[in-house]
Amino acid sequence: MKRLFRSAVAAVAIALAGSMISPVAAQTPPGVLVVGQIAEPQSLDPHTVTATNDFRILVNVYDGLVRFKDGTLEVEPALAESWDISEDGRTYTFKLRQGVKFHDGSDFDADAVKFNFDRMLREDHPFYDTGPFPLSFNFSSIEAVNVVDPHTVEFKLKEAFAPFLSNLAYPTGLIVSPAAVEQYGKDYGRHPSGTGPFKFVEWLSNQRVVIDRNPDYWGGTANLEAVVFRPITDANTRVAEMMAGGIDVMVEVPPDNLATFKQDANFTVAEQAGPHVWFAILNAKSGPFADKRVRQAANYAVNKETLVNDVLQGTATVAAGPIPPAFNWVESAVEPYPYDPEKAKALLAEAGAEKPQLTFYVTEGGSGMLDPITMGAAIQADLQAVGFAVKIETYEWNTFLGRVNPGLEGKADMAEMAWMTNDPDTVPYLTLRTDAMPDKGGFNSGYYSNPKVDELLEKARKATDQAERGKLYGEIQQIVHEDAPWLFVANWKQNAVTTAGVQDFQLQPSFLLDLRAVAKQ
């Protein structure tokens, strides 16, 4: 098996070497799927990363207690066969699958589950220093994880928390091997071990991450022999590789190329709506955007219809606030800011902001970032047309995150960003809450604070009735829209293109890549 796999990887290497020469020279081997990714992963430890780019790899190496049902955001069993929830919503008891092993041969059991969550949440845990764990906010409601018996684990919550199961299904809830963490410590992210349908083989920085089929997978053996994830940060290069046959799957197809692929019988285009929001964080703590009127002026100044119709060529709709319309049960009547440059100029005059100077962080690419350089330039032009003076600084994705996530103070006035999410709670709770400032481990990089929003977020995550939650998130949408801590831009419909030989490939509303059922001739 290993010899066959190594032969396959060697064949991929030969194909890659010829991929920019001619399509004939670039035939990837059958049974090995080559995926063109938008960036190099930060880590293969699911607890330490935040980018969908990384999660697309990780969900094929790991399992969680639960997962999203195919084609939906509904939760179904995975490593947990079943669960019970107490009447007060504060105790979740999971019955675990028996006989499951991690790829390193160690046992999956209740002790392993406890290790995973204690590692993220308890500062006194011996492997807490293998973090940081930026999305452990998702599990801040956990008071204790108790081992009832080897195949039963109990989560005690501090209070009822409606998104708990959904957050467990998100990649931060994937279960890593305690034995591997103990062996590799802070280097675990380069030596991952899960229970998933594929096992880690190698990671060559800036070249590829390779995973091969797990013959002992509890959910049935995958069709593919192996998957090779290639980081190709430049969108034009990804397109060229796809056309030449150097990759079998390309995620996040630039709008300019979508029609070309749709018209070519050698390719299949997949599209899937999902909860996504593209925005620019505005520094509400210092500089011009500390004044709400200036933030609102920016929202009136930018022609979002042009961005989604011309730059993104109809692959997105204009965003009205932080909660995407994919959550159609949220009661929101908020409409997007209209394009009104005269209103923008009037607000700047009212605020006494004469030619406000802005530093704008733009990324070269990244998860859900669509066409960030072109988008950034268009936003810059619209802002300057009403009186802003905008200087753009452009960074590679991981460098960009390293500058934005710690906060914009002293560095920039605005920064592009995108989130794909699984629940209407996630984005506002992690990015707009007062207690989610960067110095507290959150992603509120623009330092927005509104006590009413904080109060509504806490109420909404405790509500067990979806209708009540829908009303509360509608209120949050209204207030945040008015306060304008972001430049609200777009909600995207994700896409991917595959070669004709790829079968049973589907995009998921979660924006993840589930490759268990995919085959390739």
Image (cartoon, rainbow, N blue to C red):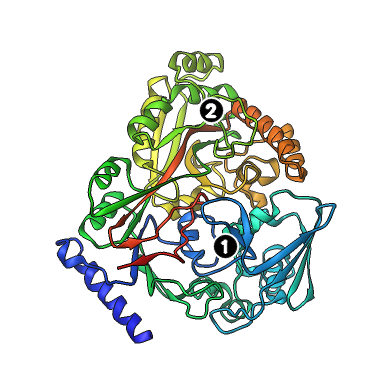
Percent position of residue 233, x then y: 34, 54
Decide which of 270, 401 is in the foreground and name it: 270
> Which residue: 51% across, 20% down?
353
Q: Is residue 336 left or right of residue 32?
A: right
The residue at which mark 2 appears reads as 288
Question: How far separated are the C-alphas under marks 2 and 1?
Answer: 33 Å
Which circle, 2 or 1, is nearer the viewer?
A: 1
> Which quarter of the figure has residue 308?
top left
Is 32 situated above or below 2?
Answer: above
What numbered label is drawn on residue 30?
none
Q: Secondary structure at mark 1?
A: loop
Percent position of residue 359, x then y: 45, 36
Percent position of residue 13, x then y: 26, 73
> Which residue: 51% across, 64% down?
59
Is 394 situated above or below 390?
Answer: below
Percent position of residue 79, x then y: 63, 69
**Can residue 207 be seen in the rendering of this structure?**
no
Q: Quadrant of the C terminus?
A: bottom left
Is 323 situated above or below 150?
Answer: above
Q: Is residue 289 left or right of residue 87?
A: left
Q: Of the residues shown, which amino acid type is indicated by label 1?
A: Thr
Mark 2, other Cα within 10 Å: few <14 / some 14–19 / many ≥20: many
Task: Tell me, yes or no, whether the two marked residues, 2 and 1, touch with CB atoms within 8 Å.
Answer: no
In primary-sequence order, the first of circles 2 and 1 is: 1
> Which residue: 50% across, 65% down?
58
The residue at which mark 1 appears reads as 48
